[in-house]
Image (cartoon, rainbow, N blue to C red):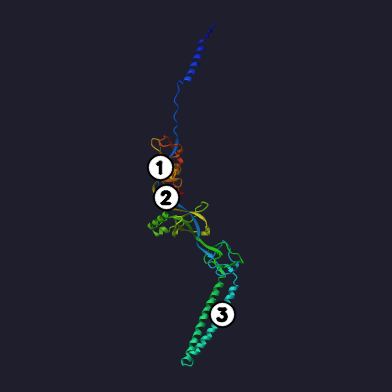
Amino acid sequence: MDRYHIVLSPGVAVHFLAAISLSACMLSGCGEKKAAGPAVPTVEVVNVAQKDVPIFREWVGTTDGLVNAKINAQVQGYLIKQNYQEGSVVKNGQVLFEIDPRPFQAALEQAKGQLAINEGQLYTAKANLDKIRPLAAVSAVSKKDLDDAIGREASARAAVQAAKAAVRKAEIDLSFTKITSPIDGIAGIAKAQLGELVGNPGGPELTTVSTVDPIKVYIPLSEQEYLHYIKEGEAKEISDRETPKLELVLADGKVFPHKGKVFFADRQVDERTGTIKVATLFPNPGNILRPGQFAKIKALIDTQEGALLVPQRAVIELQGKFQVAVVGPDNKVDLRWVKVGERAGPLWVIDEGLKPGENVIVEGIQKVKAGMPVSPKPHQEASAGAQDLPAGKQER
C-alpha cells in the first residue's frame, strides 16, 4: 500500500493545533466554573412607629322620629276630606282628615232630646216630692207614698245624669269626625282614600306624623361596649356626658354637620344578638334626616397611649392568627407572630410581638422566608402614613 505524507507549513500547523486543543477542552470540560448563587431579594421596610392613637368606633344606625304619632279614626264613618299635603309639616291640632259628620250630628240631637225628656221627668218627680213631704210630716199621706216619691225623684235625677253623659259622648264622637294631629311634625303618606269606610277596630292607621327635629338614631351596642360606656359615664361629670360628641356619616359618605349625644338605652339586651339598642339624638334643622335612613355613628371612645403602629399590608392573617416579617440588624428575615389591636386608618395597632424602631416588610413579603437574607430599603409612602395618623377607625 502506498503511504501519503502531509506536510504543513508552520503557520497552518499552529492553527491546527489550537483547534484540536479547543475541541479537547470542550469535550473534557476544562476550566469549568461553579454556578452563581441566588440573588438576595430586595424588600421595602418601614419602622415600627410609637404614637398616641385615638380609638374610634363605628356602628350602623337607623334613624327614627323623636315622636311618631299614628293617626287613627276614633269613630267609624266615611272619609270625605283630606286637609293636608303628604310629606308636609303639620302643626299640633291641625285637621288632617274629616269623616262624614251627619250621622254623629243626628246622634247628638237625639241625645239632647232624651236629656230634655229626662229633665222634664225630674222636674215632675221633684215637684211631687216637694208636695208630699209636708203632708207626710202631719201623717196626711202614708210612709209608702213618701218613699215612692223619693224613689221617683232619685230615678229621674239619675236618668238626667245618664242623658247628660250621652250628650257628652255624642259631642265627642262628633268632634272625632275632624281628625287632627296631636304633635308638630312631618305627615306621611295617607293610607286611606276618600270615600273609604274608616275606624274599623284593628284597621290600619290613616297616616303617621313624626317629630324629626331633633331626630333619634338607634344603634346596637354589644354588652361589652355598653358596660364600658356605663363605666366611663360614671367617671365623668354629667355636663361632660351631655356634650354632643357623636358624628353621623350619611349614606353618601358625608359627615352630618351637627354632632349628637346618647339619649337613652333600651330596658333589655336582645338575647338573639347579644346587643342592646341605644338611642342617640341629633339636631336636624331643615328636617334633612327622615325616619328609616341608614347611617353610621362614629364616636371617640378612647386614646391608646404609646401604641405601636405598622401599615395594615405589613400584617398577614393566617387562620385567625397574625404575622409580620421583621428584618433584623443582620438583614435576615424573622417571621413573627403578633397580637393585633385596633385599626387606625391605613395603620394597625400591634399590642404584642414588636418593639419600637424595628423594621417590618411592607413590599416583597410574599417572596421571603424565615432566616432568608434580604436587601432592605425604606418605603417612603408607608413612613409618611405612620407619621400622619388619620382621625378615624376602620371596622375589622
> Which secondary structure lies at badge 1?
strand
6 up-or-down from 64: above or below: above
Image position, residue 205 (x, y; %)? 55, 64
Q: Nearer the viewer, residue 176 or 281?
A: 176
What amino acid is labelled 2 in the image? Answer: Pro
Quadrant position of residue 321:
top left
Q: Position of residue 392 (x, y in %)?
A: 45, 49
Circle 2/circle 1 CB separation < 8 Å: no
Mark toward the viewer: 3 or 2: 3
- Relative to 268, is 107 on the left or the right? right
Q: Mark 3 vs mark 1: which is more N-terminal?
A: 3
Residue type, label 1: Trp
Residue toward you, 259 or 252: 252
Image point 52% across, 78% down: which residue? 162
Most extreme residue toward the right, as rendered? 195
In the rendered structure, find residue 147 and report the number of the disc placed on it: none
Taking depth in this image into account, of 269 and 328 the one nearest to the observer is: 269
Residue at 50% across, 12% down: 13
Residue highlighted by disc 2: 54
In the rendered structure, which amino acid carries the disc numbered 3?
Gln
- Label 3 – label 1 distance at C-alpha: 92 Å
Quarter in which the N terminus is drawn: top right
Q: Residue at x 54, y 76 (%)?
A: 166
Earlier-in-chain disc, 2 versus 1: 2
Identify the element where label 3 is drawn.
helix
At label 3, counting other C-alpha atoms closer than 10 Å, the crowd grade (few under 14, some 14-19, many 20 or more) is: some
Query: Mark number for residue 114?
Result: 3
Circle on res. 337: 1
